[in-house]
């Protein structure tokens, strides 16, 4: 995961460390609802969502420095104030910087599918990740997942119905379109080639209560990977 690190000098960019949990109202300067895009790429989806919903705060994260740089530049160019970008691994962010029931929505668009069978355990969306995501979502909060990889869609569609407190909002397990859902530059590339995108949309039940107030544990393996990525 070696990267040529670009210096990012932008008011939209966050340098988060683990000295304490991020204080989102202070960071954004208001107490608007917070939504998260995991893997914001070059920022097309994130900026469109922020433009449509100025009374919502949007956090985009990506492990790639270049993607964070491009997302910040796009937010600056379009003069969108309700966006912040951080270079961080998703599980690390949820554990270190997101409190219980703090997120109004989470979006994951075309994550790395790790297509080889022996690598599928590295996929982001696994059972323990979904439990932590549920912990971080507000009652009634939304989870959107989109992938271009059929097997990944099938895997997530199999996992989600077994996560108590999350309910499918669609009439089918997996849809090929969600009306009004922004299409990123990366997603548009697949569609232009005649390839399919697969969507899932689940909502946290309004009356769901966690049995354990402590957040679910996420394997330390991912912290080690993130630490390695930061230092490369």
Image (tube, grey):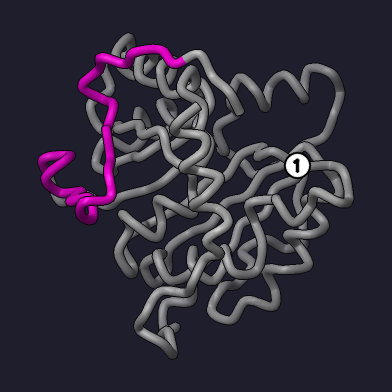
Q: Nearer the viewer, residue 156 or 112?
A: 112
Residue range (magenta)? 5-29
- Give percent across and percent down for residue 196: 82, 34
Location of residue 194 (image quadrant): top right
Number of numbered callouts drawn? 1
Q: SS for tag 1?
A: loop
* Residue at the spot 42% in from the left edge and 24% down from the top edge: 68
- Give percent across and percent down for residue 11: 20, 22
- Give percent across and percent down for residue 215: 40, 74
Label 1 sits on residue: 113
Q: Nearer the viewer, residue 148 or 49?
A: 148
Residue 11 is a magenta residue: yes
Mark 1 crowd level (few <14, some 14–19, many ≥20, 10 Å Cα): some
Q: Is residue 165 above or below residue 88?
A: below
Dominant secondary structure of the residues highlighted in magenta in the image = loop
Residue farthest along the top direction in this orientation = 77
Q: Is residue 99 above or below residue 54?
A: below
Q: Is residue 50 above or below residue 175?
A: above
* Residue at the spot 61% in from the left edge and 28% down from the top edge: 1
Residue 108 is a magenta residue: no
* Residue at the spot 64% in from the left edge and 67% down from the top edge: 168
Residue 212 in the figure: left or right of residue 200: left
* Residue at the spot 75% in from the left edge and 42% down from the top edge: 113
- Give percent across and percent down for residue 127: 65, 69
Q: Nearer the viewer, residue 46 or 22?
A: 22
Q: Is residue 65 above or below residue 108?
A: above
Residue farthest along the bottom direction in this orientation = 211
Location of residue 116 (image quadrant): top right
Residue 229 in the figure: left or right of residue 72: right
């Amino acid at each position: 995961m070696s990267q040529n690190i670009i210096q990012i000098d932008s008011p939209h960019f966050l340098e988060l460390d683990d000295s304490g949990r991020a204080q989102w109202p202070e960071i954004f300067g208001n107490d608007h609802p917070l939504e998260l895009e995991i893997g914001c790429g070059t920022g097309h989806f994130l900026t469109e969502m922020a433009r449509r919903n100025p009374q919502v705060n949007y956090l985009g994260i990506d492990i790639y420095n270049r993607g964070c740089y491009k997302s910040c530049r796009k937010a600056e160019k379009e003069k969108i104030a309700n966006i912040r970008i951080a270079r961080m691994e998703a599980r690390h962010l949820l554990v270190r910087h997101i409190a219980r029931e703090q997120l109004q929505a989470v979006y994951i668009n075309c994550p790395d599918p790790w297509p080889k069978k022996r690598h599928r355990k590295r996929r982001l969306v696994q059972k323990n990740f979904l439990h932590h995501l549920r912990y971080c979502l507000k009652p009634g909060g939304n989870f959107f997942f989109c992938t271009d990889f059929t097997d990944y869609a099938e895997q997530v569609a199999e996992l989600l119905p077994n996560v108590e407190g999350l309910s499918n909002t669609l009439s089918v397990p997996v849809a090929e379109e969600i009306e009004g859902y922004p299409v990123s530059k990366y997603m548009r590339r697949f569609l232009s080639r005649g390839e399919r995108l697969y969507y899932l949309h689940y909502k946290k039940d309004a009356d769901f209560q966690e049995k354990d107030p402590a957040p679910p544990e996420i394997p330390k393996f991912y912290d080690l990977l993130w630490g390695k990525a930061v230092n490369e």
